[in-house]
Structure formats: C-alpha cells, structure tokens
C-alpha cells in the first residue's frame, strides 16, 4: 500500500531540513517545504531534495494568472512533485496553474486547518471546491483536524486526492483523518521536533496502515 504520510519541514535551516528529509525518505510519501525554508536556504534546496524524495512546495500561491504562471513554472523547473495553490483568487488563476504545471501536480486549497479559516475560507469551501474541480487540479487541501468538514469535502470531491494538514500539534488524529477521507496526512512539528523523527514517522505509518478511507 502506498505510504500516506507527508512530513512538513517548516524549518529555516537548510542543512537540518536536508538531513531530516534524507532520514525520512523511506518512511514518507513526500516532504512538504514552505517559504521559511526557501527564504532561509534558497530555492535550490527543492532540486536537491527532489533527487531522493518527492517534494511538495507549499507556496499557497494566490495572485493574478501571470504571476501564478511564473511561480508554477519556476517550481516545476526546480523538480517539485507538486505545488499548493489557493483557489480563492478564482478560476482563471487556478486554471493557469494547472496549465503551467507540465508533469507537476497542482493541489488546490479549498479549506484550512487553523482557527482563522472559519472566518472566510472554510465557509466558502463548496464554492472553492467547484473552482478546483473545474480547473482540473490533482488534489485539494482539507483539514485533518476537522473530520466532519474533511468528510464533506471527500463526498463532494469527485475523486480528487485529499491532502490533510492539521494532524499532530494542531489536534488532528492520523487515523481519524484517513477514516474521514484523507488520502495523505501532513504532519510537521510532531515529527521534526520529536527526539526520533524516524520512530515517530514509523509510529504514524503503523497507525494508519490498516485504515481504509471512504470510497
């Protein structure tokens, strides 16, 4: 069975991030990098990591189509497996991301895992999901710490892959997230701040290995 674990390396130290990525590569589906790491170590770290593990760039791109195109093309050329792009700027921006991605996957943000998402993003999740589906994204972001909302998006997702952050420190359970419909769970601090990141990754993998997501 395909590994369901993605580790979020929300770090600024490139050497530490590379070391963690190498040690975890055999225990994860992918690693996820964010702006703090790119600003701290440079964009070349995407290419370096991509040599031994899938890299998801969590850039949450949200801009006019031309700017989206430039970011997506650069990320693609650096070897990323996927890039995360917001749906709320509209269909033209998200469609441009998909059209510019080549073989890279585009994951659309239609809901988020932090409390503030209840103000604007999550209440419009159905509209954002419609935009994502029409744009032809590979998958969507749905909160792993909100199984009810995640399950609702799974039921409406028309087969899109679901990537679920909010597991671990933000309160989400790996098992409950998969049961609710997550194809992949995203875990950050619970792994990279642990005394043994590899052991923590193994433990999570063991927890979800026999759990079936709803069809």
Image: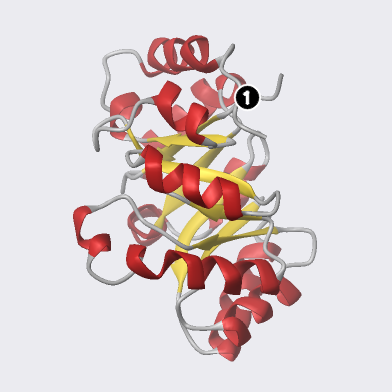
Q: Position of residue 125 (x, y in %)?
A: 44, 64
Q: Which residue is mark 1?
A: 3
Q: Position of residue 193 (x, y in %)?
A: 26, 26
Disc tally is 1
175 with respect to 91 (left or right) = left
Q: In the picture, residue 83 is in which quadrant?
A: bottom right
Residue at left 68%, top 73%? 135
Residue at left 67%, top 81%? 96
Q: Is residue 80 above or below residue 22?
A: below
Q: Nearer the viewer, residue 116 or 28?
A: 116
Q: In the picture, residue 11 is in which quadrant?
A: top left
Q: Is disc 1 surrounded by few (<14), some (14 to 19) or many (20+) residues within 10 Å?
A: some
| Residue 86 visible in this rendered orientation of the protein | no
The residue sitting at the right extreme is 103
Q: In the picture, residue 17 is in which quadrant?
A: top left
Q: Position of residue 65 (x, y in %)?
A: 58, 88
Q: Nearer the viewer, residue 129 or 93?
A: 129
105 with respect to 164 (left or right) = right
| Residue 29 visible in this rendered orientation of the protein | yes
Residue at left 41%, top 40%? 8
């Amino acid at each position: 069975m395909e590994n369901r674990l993605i580790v979020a390396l929300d770090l600024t130290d490139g050497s530490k991030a590379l070391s963690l990525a190498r040690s975890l590569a055999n225990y994860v589906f992918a690693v996820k990098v964010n702006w703090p790491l790119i600003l701290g170590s440079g964009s070349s770290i995407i290419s370096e990591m991509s040599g031994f593990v899938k890299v998801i760039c969590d850039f949450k791109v949200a801009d006019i189509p031309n700017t989206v195109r430039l970011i997506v093309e650069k990320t693609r050329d650096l070897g990323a497996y996927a890039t995360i792009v917001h749906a709320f700027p509209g269909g033209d921006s998200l469609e441009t991301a998909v059209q510019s991605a080549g073989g890279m996957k585009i994951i659309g943000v239609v809901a988020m895992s932090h409390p503030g998402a209840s103000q604007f993003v999550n209440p419009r999740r159905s509209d954002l999901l419609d935009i994502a589906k029409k744009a032809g994204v590979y998958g969507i972001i749905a909160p792993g710490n909100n199984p009810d909302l995640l399950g609702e998006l799974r039921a409406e997702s028309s087969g899109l892959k679901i990537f679920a952050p909010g597991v671990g420190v933000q309160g989400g359970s790996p098992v409950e997230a998969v049961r609710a419909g997550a194809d992949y769970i995203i875990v950050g601090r619970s792994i990279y701040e642990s005394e043994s990141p590899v052991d923590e990754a193994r433990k999570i993998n063991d927890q979800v290995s026999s759990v079936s997501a709803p069809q």
